[in-house]
């Protein structure tokens, strides 16, 4: 399980939770799994073409995913 810390604007989508757990081998799969659990999540963090929104910061172990492999960043 991956521990996901949510920014305040995303918490209403997750029933107010600050932290949720989800599965995913990479960020793309994680986002898809969060979307399956809470419809509307994906459109808040991704552009229509499936790329990361420029104003949404996604971190993996304190590193900005934009400087890693984006949505292809592997998770463990």
Image (tube, grey):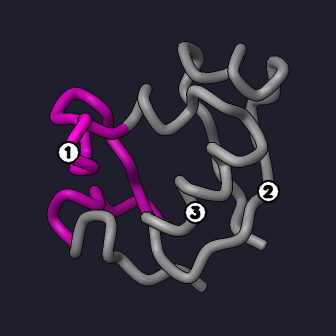
The first of marks 2 and 3 along the sequence is: 2
**Residue depicted at x 70% and y 48%:** 36
| Up-down relation of residue 40 to residue 8 (above or below) | below
Crowding near the residue tagged with mark 2, few <14, some 14–19, many ≥20 C-alpha atoms within 10 Å: few
Q: Tell me the residue that label 1 is attached to.
A: 49
Which residue position holds label 2? 21
Task: Give percent across and percent down for residue 7.
Answer: 54, 26
Label 2: element kind: strand
| Quadrant of res 63 | bottom left
Q: Is residue 5 above or below residue 21?
A: above
Q: Main secondary structure of the magenta part?
A: loop
The reply, left or right, for residue 28 in relation to residue 29 is: left
| Magenta region | 46-68
Image mark for residue 30 = 3
Cα–Cα span, label 1 and label 3: 17 Å
Q: Between label 1 and label 2, give the one nearer the viewer.
A: 1
């Amino acid at each position: 399980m991956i521990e996901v810390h949510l920014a305040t604007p995303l918490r209403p989508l997750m029933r107010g939770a600050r932290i949720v757990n989800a599965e995913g081998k990479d960020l793309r799969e994680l986002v898809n799994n969060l979307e399956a659990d809470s419809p509307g999540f994906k459109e808040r963090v991704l552009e229509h073409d499936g790329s990361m929104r420029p104003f949404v910061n996604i971190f993996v172990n304190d590193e900005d995913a934009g400087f890693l492999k984006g949505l292809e960043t592997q998770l463990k």
